[in-house]
Amino acid sequence: MIMETMTQKAFTKTVNTVMSTSALHRRSGVPRMIAEEKEVRKLIDDAEQDVKADDLKEAGKKLHQAMQIAKNIGNEKLLNYIHEFIQKFSYSTKAQPVELSPTETDGFILDIGGGGEGIIGRLNGKQVVAIDTSERELEETQNEALKAVMDATDLKFLPESFDVCTAFFSLMYIPKNKHLKVFEEVHRVLKDDGKFLVWDVRIPERYGDYKAFIVRLKVRLPDEEIETGYGVKWRTQNIEYFKELAQKTNFKIVNEWSKGEIFRLEMSKNV
């Protein structure tokens, strides 16, 4: 769903696979293949070296590959082993509840990082233009949103094209030195008094030997509930940081809330 940094998509997918083992149990009758088990353990060993080298991008790719193999051969022991390995270098929050309903607007919604689960697209369907830097993430998204490969720091839209812009746990994936440009671009493409809605997570100062931060979510939509998690290389951020960005880019804070580790900001474009 999200943008740049780590190919954190691979890391995020690994987290989500770990969190859901039902598919594994359905495959419990698949023969365990010794060669594939060795391949999984080799991938984990290589991922450990990547973690020590602070290369979470490569580690995420290898762990995701290992997880898929473990699921395919129905090896719960390997799945648990991968889970334990991830816990060694990743801090994970408790599941944070988020309740969502469709955004009320007659116009179009630009969804930044709208690939993957495509939460906003599930809610507002054809009103949504979902952008992501990953074509594969957009292809895997199952909703009625219009999808386009695009960088949020360089939006290919005319000024005042959208009534609403959303970022559902996607700004955490964009490098902090690009956040200001994202806010400026959102301000440019929003109509006068347009809304910018941001959901994200508070990431404190790093402690211990943790290298990655994972926020686990339980997202309640009107007709379904989705359990997911988003993992990123550890860096600090909080609601005050995003409020400062809003002030710098001429957004007005209309509403805000913080619950547990997560927060939501509703901003309005000043004219």
Image (tube, helix red, strand yellow):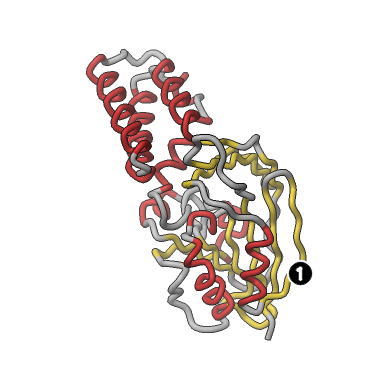
Quadrant location of the C terminus?
bottom right
Residue 101 in picture, x, y percent from top left: 70, 54
Q: Is residue 232 left or right of residue 269?
A: left
Viewer-proximal residue, 74 or 56?
Answer: 56
Residue 53 in picture, x, y percent from top left: 33, 40
Q: Is residue 173 left or right of residue 246?
A: left
Amino acid beneath label 1: Val
Viewer-proximal residue, 249 or 167?
Answer: 249
Q: Is residue 271 left or right of residue 40?
A: right
Q: Which residue is mark 1?
A: 254
Residue 132 in picture, x, y percent from top left: 44, 60
Viewer-proximal residue, 236 or 264?
Answer: 236
Count of marks placed on residues:
1
Q: Work out whether 76 lies above or below 142.
A: above
Q: Residue at x 46, y 74 (%)?
A: 155
Q: Work out whether 137 lies above or below 109.
A: above
Q: Residue at x 54, y 41 (%)?
A: 214
Q: Residue 36: which quarter of the image?
A: top left
